[in-house]
Image: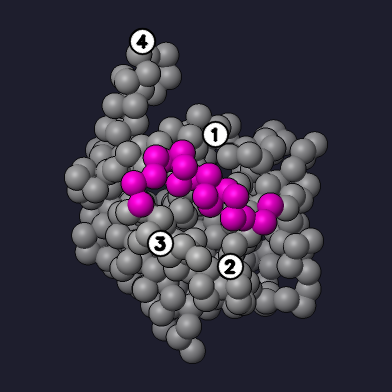
Amino acid sequence: MHDAKSIFDSGLEPAEVEAFFENSAERVATPCADGELVWRIWGDGPPLVLLHGGYGSWRHWIRNILPLGAHYRLYVPDMPGLGDSATAPQPYHADSLAKIISNGLDIILPEPTRFHLTGFSFGGLLSGHVAAQQGERVDKLVLVSPGGLGMTIQKNVVLQKTKQVSEPSDETERHRQNLATLMFADPDNIDDLAVYLQIESVNLARTKSRQIAVTDALRRALPSIKARLNSIHGGKDAASYGQASEREKLFRLIQPDMDFRIIPDAGHWVMYETPEAFNATLLELLQNE
């Protein structure tokens, strides 16, 4: 059985690393509009649902699957209109997208099964709505650098357009620049696998998540959440620059005893840039009583 270190230090090409995880997953589907919501399942143990970020896919969690899967059975969907999942009906919004995921959970994890839920970025926003819809079934909810809090970003984030470039190398370089601008704290941590996964996910994306992420959609859902709330942020996250104390204050208004963690040297894609610290932190939050 491979471990995380052996896979990522093996010298495999990015596509081969991706294929390893694809081939080791159990793949199931639930309804999404006229098509399917595609889920990948790894690991053994109590159920843990992982929701990826905007313009992303299951690939956002690639460095976390093996360590987390040693403790939990992971249910990882490509969210509506992202990755391999069908596009949601128009007009879509946070609650309607979350309802597709929530309905899928009712099928693959039927009542009275309880589960933990962790969402990253746009997936953090949607996980708040899923948790509100699922009520007592969600044990712990961990919001990882979530959007939808209605807070103004204090750092100017300008992303490069990656379509309609003259050469594939130009497209690759623009994706690398976007990772440096938004997703990573240290550009030296951007490896070829990160760039490959970014290109794969962005090129499949159809849901325009940013127009929802800049609203207060998650903030409005928070009071309806019955799960135990926790949060993880990268200390150098460009998407929430200067907001850490304001975010913590907001969450504590909902649950005063919630656990708010910062991983100091990480950017927005905290679970990829600092996987060891992130995995240890998430496991601690999920296993604390």
Query: Would residue 96 be found to the left or right of residue 42 on screen?
Result: right
Earlier residue among tags 3 and 4: 3
Q: Give residue 118's position: percent from left, percent from top.
A: 51, 64
- The CA distance from mark 3 to mark 2 is 13 Å
Earlier residue among tags 2 and 4: 2
Query: How dense is the environment of label 2, judged by Cα within 10 Å: few (below 14), some, or many (20 and up)?
Result: many
Earlier residue among tags 1 and 4: 4
- The CA distance from mark 2 to mark 4 is 42 Å
Residue at disc 1, secondary structure:
loop
Identify residue for label 4.
166
- Residue 98 against residue 13 in the figure, above or below: below
Q: Which residue is at 21% across, 60% downward? A: 265
Identify residue for label 3.
4
- Label ID, residue 43: 2
Magenta highlight: main SS: helix
Q: Which residue is at 77% across, 77% downward? A: 112
Identify residue for label 1.
205
Q: Is residue 1 visible?
A: yes
Q: Which residue is at 69% across, 37% downward? A: 86
Q: Which segment is the magenta one?
A: 10-27
Q: Give residue 40's position: percent from left, percent from top.
A: 63, 54
Earlier residue among tags 3 and 2: 3
Per the image, is 51 magenta? no
Earlier residue among tags 1 and 2: 2
Task: Inspect the image, locate mark 1, and give the three-letter code of the amino acid beneath it.
Answer: Ala
Q: Is residue 221 visible?
A: no
